Image (cartoon, rainbow, N blue to C red):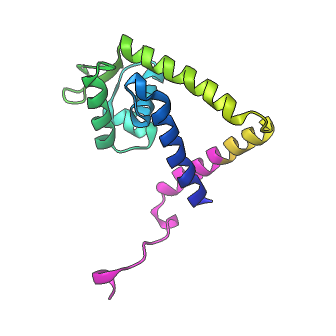
Amino acid sequence: MTLAVFRLNGDLLTAGDALVDDLGLTSARWQVLGAVALSPVPLPVAHIARNMGLTRQAVQRVVDDLHEVGFVRIDPNPHHRRAHLVALTGPGETAYRHAIARKDVWFDDLCAGLDPQAIAAAAALLREIQRRIGETAQDDRSIPPKPMRGRDVP
């Protein structure tokens, strides 16, 4: 199942890239833009990364790209001198709205003829697996050790 999810993720990223390319977005930009758009307040990059389950460095690179094209602005943070706040701009909000509208049409077409209950069950299953992974990430003992290779072998 893990391999199927990895393949699905790759296919979703490829499809997402094609869907929003002319909007100046990639799947990565779209994801971060969505995190900013859906937050009720501007957030520092570290909080965006934590909310998305990504590294701060990866999100920072995408935020820099989004800032360069004018989709987000970087504001001072009154609570932390170095952790600036990321906020949506007008063009960023427009790009995000267009991306979501396209996604809605694309996904409706993709799922046409599929059982809505099966879709809901699949989504629930993925959320439960994600929740369990989150729990195991907090308890390193539940993650199997990596196999030893090369110089690591005693």
Magenta stretch: includes residue 133: yes
Q: Is residue 101 above or below residue 6?
A: above
Q: Is residue 81 above or below residue 4?
A: above
From the image, which quarter does the C terminus lie in?
A: bottom left
Residue 80, position as x, y percentages in the image:
23, 27
Q: Nearer the viewer, residue 73 or 129?
A: 73
Please give the name of the residue rendered at 77% of the width and 42% of the height, measured from the top-left corner: 118
Q: Nearer the viewer, residue 98 or 152?
A: 98
Provide the major secondary structure of the magenta segment: helix
Q: Which residues are magenta?
A: 126-154
Magenta stretch: includes residue 10: no
Please give the name of the residue rendered at 42% of the width and 72% of the height, measured from the top-left corner: 146
Q: Does residue 147 appear to the left or right of 74 in the view shown?
A: right
Residue 93, position as x, y percentages in the image:
43, 15
Q: Nearer the viewer, residue 46 or 110?
A: 110
Residue 8, position as x, y percentages in the image:
57, 49
Please give the name of the residue rendered at 80% of the width and 38% of the height, measured from the top-left corner: 115
